[in-house]
Amino acid sequence: MNTQILSTLTNAALQGLFAEITGEPAKRFASVSAGVKRVQAALEEKGLTVEIEDGAPVLVKLQAEEAPAFDIVGYLAPGADLPKAAAVEGFQRRDDHVRAFAVETLVTPVAIEGTAQFDAHVAAFVLAEEEAAEADREDELAAERDAEDAHDAAVAAAEADQARETSISELAAELLRKTRAPAAEAIENEPGMGAKARALAETRHARAKAANDKAKKAKGKPAAAARTDGLKPGSKLAMLADFVCRPEGATHKEACAHVGWGHCLPMLMKACQKAGITLRKEKQGAETRYFGTPAQG
């Protein structure tokens, strides 16, 4: 209806009508059709319509009719006499002839049940997400336990190798003592033995005795010897040991990223062991942090 009326006006009349609607001066429109569109948009924005009275356009304010509010509390109350449908809200719309009328949107018990079903789906989704997160935490804990077991096995194997090497060194020293020493004594006491040969025999005897003494000192304490060796400054083991001695500590992943390794828990424990650092593990939420305490010198 508005479009039909506006199409009968001139460009100047549309310009004046637009200024009356918006309260601002308007420029001449490029064409009548352009002016009709601009005026129509302004009418809808201001909630107005236009009518012709005595041959002149007149602005008319549209009155919206509000629908009664929907009582959701009474609707859901136990034992309530539920209607098949109830008005929820009212709003205004226009038909093809731009006539204003009120429209009621209705909600039925089926809609309420659908909302409850949706909430149930959301709760199930949240539960599944929590279960997946818990499974990830269990996998992480299992991986940490496997890494610790691998570290313990590596330490035990290293200690066994060290003990075996010590035993072999001790046996070799004993054989040298039994074979080299009598031979050197016999050569030394042999009549006509030159000074050079005698000095060579004494050197060999001294080496055999030194090897025997070294084997006796290392016997029974292979791991202790490794722990007192310390770490090479600037090495990745030293970097790991320093990183976990920070006040905030470090997680396994942070320590690995610090030295550029993908998996470093066994090496972290080895570094702390060699440096004499006490490594403490603390669970903080879903992650495990390691705190190093240097030995008091």
Image (spheres, helix red, strand yellow):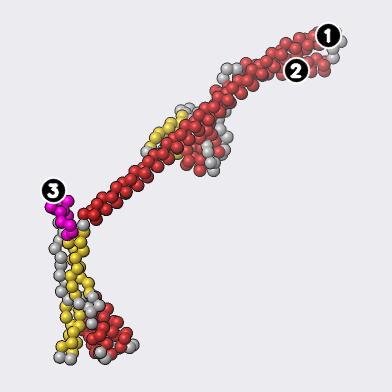
In this rendering, is residue 171 above or below 124? above
**Residue 199, percent across and down?**
79, 17
Mark 2: secondary structure: helix
Mark 1 → mark 3, Cα distance in angstroms: 124 Å
**Left or right for 258, reference 188:** left
Comparing marks 3 and 2, which lies closer to the viewer?
3
The boundaries of the magenta stretch are: 72-86
Mark identifier at residue 79: 3
Q: Residue at x 18, y 70 (%)?
A: 102
- In the image, 254 versus 263, the foreground residue is 263
Compared to 95, does 274 lie above or below? Answer: above
State which tag comes first along the sequence, 3 or 2. Answer: 3
Label 3 to label 2: alpha-carbon separation: 109 Å
The vertical placement of 263 against 53, above or below, is: above
Look at the magenta stretch and give its main secondary structure.
loop
Kind of residue indicated by mark 3: Gly
Asked whether disc 1 touches disc 3, contact meaning CB atoms under 8 Å apart, the reply is no
Seen at 32% across and 85% down, the residue is 34
Find out whether residue 65 is within the magenta segment: no
Q: Nearer the viewer, residue 71 or 31?
A: 71
- Above or below, 175 against 51 in this view is above
Q: Which residue is mark 1?
A: 190
Query: In which quadrant is the N terminus drawn?
Result: bottom left
In this view, the residue in front, 17 or 63, is 63
